[in-house]
Image (cartoon, helix red, strand yellow):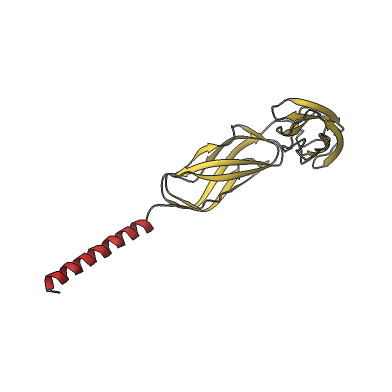
Amino acid sequence: MDRPAKLIVAVTAIIAIAVIGAVAYSTLSAPTVVLTGLQALSTNPGLTANASSSERQVNPGQNFSAVLSLSPHWPISVEYISIATPGFSIISLNASLPLRVDQNTTLSVVLRSDQSYSGAVLFIVNCLNSSDLAEKILIPDVTADTSSKTVVLVSVSNVGDVALSNSTAYLIRSDGLAVNSTPLHTEGLLPGKISYFNINMSYAAATIIELYRVQVVTALGANATSRVFALTCNC
């Protein structure tokens, strides 16, 4: 091979190496959003908030999902949710705000950053007490016998500042209709205590396509709702 041909081959090789190097550098140095962790801070001591996500790296401008887990210590009204980390914004939330939270609640959040970032993301959950009543209650659990379409047990926790008055439990269908009710002798239940009530609150017309919850309302107006549950099953 003569000298000009060798020179052409060498120059071509150098150019090829330079192009490959530029592409590799561009790929490695492309802007990314790297999440080292997610945190959530509640503005009210009556609510504990946590955030998590299975996605750890996305491109700027790309949506990604996170989960907010809300645990109330008494009934709370979530007024709005924001992100304190600069450059991030909430695109959508699977709930309408304000949202009353009186049971453990999980919210799905879609967020995005339009710039590169590496670090943690901080959510701020702004919330208020849902009422100014001294009575405050939560419903830690409810038990249903799906074979008889009957709620057989409900628990009431006094998370307020005074002993409770008597209350009424309502069986609420997923469309909001109260289909049955029963009185609960909660009178005198002291702050910080829980009572369990064996009841017999049924709804014979319940179907497998519906979900139900129990709402308890005291004589003085404090109220709370249970987790959602099925009243019957395709067994």
Q: Is residue 200 left or right of residue 75?
A: right
Tell me the residue at 55%/41% (across/down).
Answer: 109
For residue 162, which quarter of the picture?
Answer: top right
For residue 192, which quarter of the picture?
Answer: top right
Nearer-the-camera pick, 144 or 1: 1
For residue 143, which quarter of the picture?
Answer: top right
Where in the figure is residue 215, as x and y percent of width and height? Answer: 76, 31
Nearer-the-camera pick, 130 or 184: 184
Where in the figure is residue 230, as x and y percent of width and height? Answer: 74, 37
Tell me the residue at 12%/73% (across/down).
Answer: 3
Where in the figure is residue 217, as x and y percent of width and height? Answer: 78, 29
Total labels: the figure holds: 0
Q: Is residue 167 left or right of residue 120?
A: right
Q: Is residue 76 above or below residue 48?
A: above
Q: Is residue 12 left or right of residue 121?
A: left
Q: Image quadrant for the N terminus?
A: bottom left
Q: Image quadrant for the C terminus?
A: top right
Where in the figure is residue 139, as x and y percent of width and height? Answer: 76, 38
Would residue 219 be visible to someone looking at this image? Answer: no
Q: Is residue 179 left or right of residue 127?
A: right
